[in-house]
Image (cartoon, helix red, strand yellow):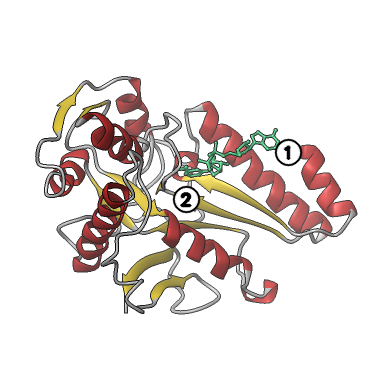
Amino acid sequence: MHNVIELAKQYKLRIFIPSTIGAFGPDSPRNPTPNVTVQRPRTIYGVSKVHAELLGEYYHHRFGLDFRCLRFPGVISSDPPGGGTTDYAVAVFHEGLLNKKYECYLEPTTRLPMIYIEDCLSALFQFLNTPNELLRRRVYNVTAMSFTPEELFSELLKYIPDLKITYKPDKRQHIERLIAINDVTSIGKSSDNIGRFAEVTSIITLGAIQSGGSGAGGRPAHCPRQAGHKFSTIAKHDGIGDGNTNMICRGWWS
Ligand SMILES: NC(=O)c1ccc[n+]([C@@H]2O[C@H](COP(=O)([O-])OP(=O)(O)OC[C@H]3O[C@@H](n4cnc5c(N)ncnc54)[C@H](O)[C@@H]3O)[C@@H](O)[C@H]2O)c1
């Protein structure tokens, strides 16, 4: 990363580095977690991300580098899961559709922030297209929705009724407790969150079933987007919009 950022400085390139909610730690304030606050993560993943954030900020302030960074929650996409703390929400689509069973490594009530890949890319697109002078800082949080394993699985059971779920928490349950949860749109509190959550589950499940694939992804024939609806994302961050300290990204069909 040092080499890449140094090259970006020398050749006057713009540079974007994805960060994560794992860049926060147990001392970080929650609900909501501000953009600038105590971080002090206790995982090497989080430490490496804070390192990237601070190095990028340093190059921006010292050399004028156009460095930008977003802290993403767990990203739900059709890519195979990697094994991170939020990856159960991807793995269940792959394993659930293929084997009709899934063993979850988190406790059923573990609430974590997540984002659907299209919302993630939309936030990224808007962020990278924002003129430099409108940005108040280089690193922003991104929030979309929060849910627990049991909430996701009960939604999924509507589409795969014979899906068998078991729970066997492993060390990732411990990591979850170290992460500050930016739970601004907890399910049950926000109708937008519930709507998008159900929408994402149906898009992925029906898309995968209809494409005959075992993995998440694809797009069902009845999907509103195919019917000519437009997918939108609101992205607000200080410097633009209403001056919130958090960047709020929420997808909906309009
Ligand atoms: N997936 C998530 O839920 C999530 C959440 C927050 C942040 N992030 C961050 O987003 C980024 C991408 O995550 P992802 O889940 O898409 O990971 P991924 O493993 O699917 O993709 C990583 C990509 O980086 C490439 N890569 C790895 N080492 C490289 C190297 N030395 N040089 C060039 N390319 C290299 C890999 O080939 C791969 O294509 C990561 O920085 C991750 O920390 C991911």
Q: Quadrant of residue 176?
A: top left
Q: Please tell me whether residue 114 is drawn above or below residue 93 in the rendered image.
A: below
The answer to whether 78 appears left or right of 67 in the picture is left
Residue tagged by mark 2? 72
Q: CA distance from mark 1 to mark 2?
A: 19 Å
If the picture is divided into quarters, which one holds ligand 1? top right
Q: Work out whether residue 12 or residue 98 is closer to the camera in this orientation and state it.
A: 98
Which residue is situated farthest in the right direction here? 10
| Residue at x-position 34% and y-position 45% | 181
- Give the secondary structure at mark 2: strand
Q: In what quadrant of the picture does the N terminus appear? A: top right
Question: Residue 55: x and y, percent?
Answer: 71, 44
**If you read the primary sequence from the N terminus, does the residue marked by circle 1 or circle 2 appear first?**
1
| Residue at x-position 16% and y-position 40% | 150
Q: Residues within 10 Å of mark 1 (few under 14, many from 20)?
A: few
Q: Amino acid at mark 1?
A: Met
Residue tagged by mark 1? 1
Q: Amino acid at mark 2?
A: Phe
